[in-house]
Every structure is written in C-alpha cells, then in structure tokens.
Amino acid sequence: AQSVTQPDARVTVSEGASLQLRCKYSYSGTPYLFWYVQYPRQGLQLLLKYYSGDPVVQGVNGFEAEFIKSNSSFHLRKASVHWSDSAVYFCAVRFPNTNKVVFGTGTRLQVLP
Amino acid sequence: GPKVLQIPSHQIIDMGQMVTLNCDPVSNHLYFYWYKQILGQQMEFLVNFYNGKVMEKSKLFKDQFSVERPDGSYFTLKIQPTALEDSAVYFCASSSTGNTGQLYFGEGSKLTVL
C-alpha cells in the first residue's frame, strides 16, 4: 500500500544545532515529495518539493531535503536551527497514479534556546 | 504569495445540526481538497474535486459529507447531520495542476460539535 511514515513524533534540539527529520514512503516508483511546516493555529506552508532532477533540493529558511530512491526516503535537514523553527513538520507524498496528497503523521520540533 | 481563504475560522454547533465550511481557493486553481486534522495531528485526506466532480474520497468522507463549488464561487464542505466525532480543524487546499502541483492551504476552520 502507498504510505508515508515519519517515525519521530517529537524532536527536541538546542538552538544552533543541526537537524534531521525523517520521512520514508512506500511506493515502487518515484513519487512527488513535499515538506510542509505548520505553525500553531495556522495552515500548512510549503518548505520544499521534489519532482525530479538533483536529489538534494533547497527550500526556504535554510532547509533542504535529499531524495534517496534506494532508501525510499526524503529526510529534511537544516544545518543550524533557530528557536522560531519550532513547529510541526509534515512530509507529504503525491503518488503519480492519484491526485491526492498523503501526509505523514508529522514531527513536532521543539528548539530550546 | 497565493492565498486560500476559509470562512468561518471557528464554528460551534450542536450535534445533529448542519454546517457549511467555505473555501475561497487560489484564483485560477482547478483542483480543490479538504483535509481533516484532529488535535494538531495527522492531516487526513477527505476528498478532492475537479471540474465539478468528486475525484477521490477517503473512508472519512462519510455519507453525511458533501462538497460543491457552484458557479465558481466558494468550494464548500457541508456536513449534515453533524456528529461529535466531526469536531476537528478542516483545511481547504487548492492546486493548479492535478498530479504535480503543490497544495496551497487555508488557515483552517475549527469545528466544535457539542
């Protein structure tokens, strides 16, 4: 079945530390991949997306993600987090045979000052 | 950037009543979606809509749910009658293309069913 997994429900890091949020999907082909961020009481905002080409994609606010086909993964990274990065991060996948976007369960990031 | 507007931002109703959630999608977008989020957790797909028709719906899209976009106006989600388990935040999204376009989300409509 087509699915998206974010194994870490919560991640806590100190300000200035590096960050990796994990995302894996279940699909034999190459889907369209997204990372969204949700701040409290707001909708989702797109951080970055991958359709094809360079497997490392750059997003807003210093975020990047790497598509690794052999691992069916699309982990989000940031070299140095800021307290304002505290939010919930959702990995999302659009499988080519469907028009719907499937979300992972989200990872709540807390950045300690 | 492009904006999706949702009205109302919060609605409280009694169980069994009808509710309509309104969404004003990004201009010129053709694909519309509703998602349900409970307690800030997973975004659950409900339905997507294109060219006046429901394209796909999930098991969460119960018979009491309906969507429409009459004459290019608001894209609406109607629940009739409501149940306690319908309490959630409902997010509308739109995209310009079907299978590659990113989704643009509204800020959500919080529904509380008493």
Image: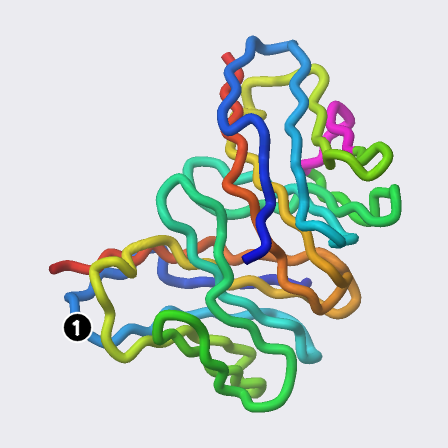
* Range covered by the magenta-colored residues: B60-67
Q: Position of residue B5 (x, y in %)?
A: 59, 39
**What's the residue at 82%, 39% (across, down)?**
B72
Quadrant of the image containing the N terminus of chain B: bottom right
Q: Residue A3 versus residue A97: which sits nearer the camera?
A: A97
The residue tagged with tag 1: helix, strand or loop? loop
Q: Position of residue B46 (x, y in %)?
A: 68, 42
Q: Is residue A64 above or below residue B58?
A: below
Is residue B78 on the magenta stretch? Answer: no
- Binning the other alpha carbons within 10 Å of mark 1 as few (below 14), some (14 to 19) or many (20 upward) gives some
**What's the residue at 73%, 34% (across, down)?**
B74
What type is the residue that disc 1 sits on? Gly
Q: Quadrant of residue A111?
A: bottom left
Q: Quadrant of residue B4?
A: top right
Magenta part, dominant SS: loop
User: Is B58 on the left-hand or right-hand side of A20?
Assistant: right
Is residue B65 on the magenta stretch? Answer: yes
Q: Position of residue B78 (x, y in %)?
A: 71, 25
Q: Is residue A108 above or below residue B24?
A: below
User: Is B45 on the left-hand or right-hand side of B109?
Assistant: right
Please, which chain is the residue tagged with disc 1 on?
A
**Residue lying farthest to the left in this orientation:** A113
Residue with the mark numbered 1: A16
